[in-house]
Image (cartoon, coloured by chain):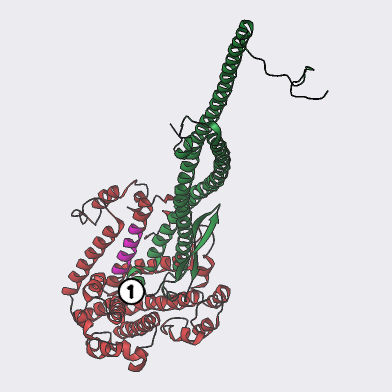
Chain colours: A red, B green
Amino acid sequence: MKSNLHILPSTTDLKIHLQTTDYGNFLNNQTNPLTVSKIDTEMRQKLCREFDYFRNHSLEPLSTFFTYMTCSYMIDNVILLMNGALQKKSVKEILVKCHPLGRFTEMEAVNIAETTSDLFNAVLVETPLAPFFQDCMSENTLDELNIELLRNKLYKSYLEAFYKFCKNHGDVTAEIMCPILEFEADRRAFIITLNSFGTELSKEDRETLYPTCGKLYPEGLRLLAQAEDFDQMKRVAEHYGVYKPLFDAVGGSGGKTLEDVFYEREVQMNVLAFNRQFHYGVFYAYVKLKEQEMRNIVWIAECISQRHRTKINSYIPIL
Amino acid sequence: MGCWCCRQWLNPVHHNAGPDQFVFVLAQTIMKARLKGAQTGRNLLKKKSDALTLRFRQILKKIIETKMLMGEVMREAAFSLAEAKFTAGDFSTTVIQNVNKAQVKIRAKKDNVAGVTLPVFEHYHEGTDSYELTGLARGGEQLAKLKRNYAKAVELLVELASLQTSFVTLDEAIKITNRRVNAIEHVIIPRIERTLAYIITELDEREREEFYRLKKIQEKKKILKEKSEKDLEQRRAAGEVMEPANLLAEEKDEDLLFE
């Protein structure tokens, strides 16, 4: 399907093309002109419906697995709500912008809190996110912390908890999920390091944001925390056989960035998950691949609508 | 009949030309001075109009260049937005939530071209980048590129705004100046010239009148004189005229007792 999409002249043709695939008639109710954001929202809702379908049919411990999967979206939503509540914005408009996969029941109650500690005590304690909050900090420091740092710290404890859960579950699930999560942890460490060059983020702060469940723990993370530029980072990666070829592929022909390379590797690992049977990793892989597909379609649609054909092939191919 | 600007002096009362003529000459001098003034004014205004038009053309050229560049930059910026969304996910809500103060502000300064003040906008940065850590986990590189592209776009927009306001102001100024030049050239100067011509013709006419009058008087006098001489001749011939004693003729004077 992907190979034909990029020759289409307009977004309505895109819609027609998508009808022949698994996506079916999901865009039928949309009037013209078809904007990229509409396509994006519709696809996300479809994914949400499928996910809820899976979830409703699941039992323990699969349902806990699903909860863990939604935690990452919940973290984003909570950060958004906290920001909005602090700035006294109306809850309704923020709720609309929250990611549908990250819904939790206490979302509407967020606006009663005045400060972040109130928020935590009243609302977040009930959610599955509570242990992550407790992990990173005491209540007092919740107020002063930068929102982005908070988001990354939460994600770190979430990833570590998820990893532990998968490992404890054992069996094929652990075999499939643990490498994926290790890769995710290391990837976050690399990207955070890369993006913090030139900002006011200190090295100690940076180190607290690295998830510890990856291959880089502990020496690699320590070395990374000391790195000052891209080359030093690359040298750290060369100690690990898995990451050396990835870093070598950066730059090259086609101008790939580190993030593109990481995305490709993630897609590869997720596709491999489908080769085994009877494990929970398939659900994780399915959702992640579906998301990547959505991103690709949105990218192609944007290129078409902005008439920027040259880069239309820089999406991440699946399979 | 009279000039609209000095009616009282051209009252053509036909009496003795003396004092009137003086007034006419005065009027003529004043009109000449006025004509000179109008011409100088017209030249100055024309120069101003030319300077403004020159600047106008320059600005127009610059506007065209900037607009083309603007198209390119905006396209680039919109595309880098798409790239960033591809890598970093949807960060729009995060960005919108974190807005508090403006980081790029504008100062307005004045520029003077041939007497016309033009506003010029200059941008300056204030405060630190509050979005420094956005995209820390994903897409930071694309976000940095995006920030740079849109910053460039904003700078271009500010410049374009300055250029366009100057364009509009200059246009107004040029129109006004040209109107004035035309008014002077086609209305005021011809009026003054007509008035001047009229004064000159009046003066000429007066002179001619004077001349004629003098001539007529001379003629009349001559006729009178001829007539009286004729009379005298006739009377002398008739012997009625007593010639008065000619003091100079050497005749005997009765009153003289002694010789």
From the viewer's side, name the closer residue of A239 and A186: A186
**Residue position for label 1:** B97
Judge from the rendering whether residue A118 lies leftward or rightward of residue B114; answer left or right: left
Magenta portion: prevailing SS class: helix
Question: Looking at the picture, which amino acid does disc 1 mark?
Answer: Gln
Q: Does residue A57 appear in the picture of this structure?
A: no
Q: Residue at x 40, y 83 (%)?
A: A213
- Where A47 sits versus A74, above or below? above
- Residue B99 is situated, as x and y percent measured from the top left of the image, at 36, 73
Judge from the rendering whether residue A312 lies leftward or rightward of residue A250; answer left or right: left
Q: Which residues are magenta?
A: A287-298
Q: Which residue of the protein is positioned furthest toward the left in this rendering?
A: A57
- Residue A105 is situated, as x and y percent measured from the top left of the image, at 18, 80
The chain that hosts pointer 1 is: B
- Mark 1, secondary structure of its residue: helix
Whether residue A249 appears in magenta in the rendering, the answer is no
Q: Residue at x 67, y 18 (%)?
A: B244
Q: Which residue of the protein is positioned furthest toward the right in this rendering?
A: B259
Quadrant assignment, res A25: bottom left
- Residue A262 is situated, as x and y percent measured from the top left of the image, at 44, 69
Judge from the rendering whether residue A36 lies leftward or rightward of residue B241; answer left or right: left
Q: Does residue A192 appear in the picture of this structure?
A: yes
Quadrant assignment, res B78: bottom left
Whether residue A293 appears in magenta in the rendering, the answer is yes
Quadrant assignment, res B30: top right
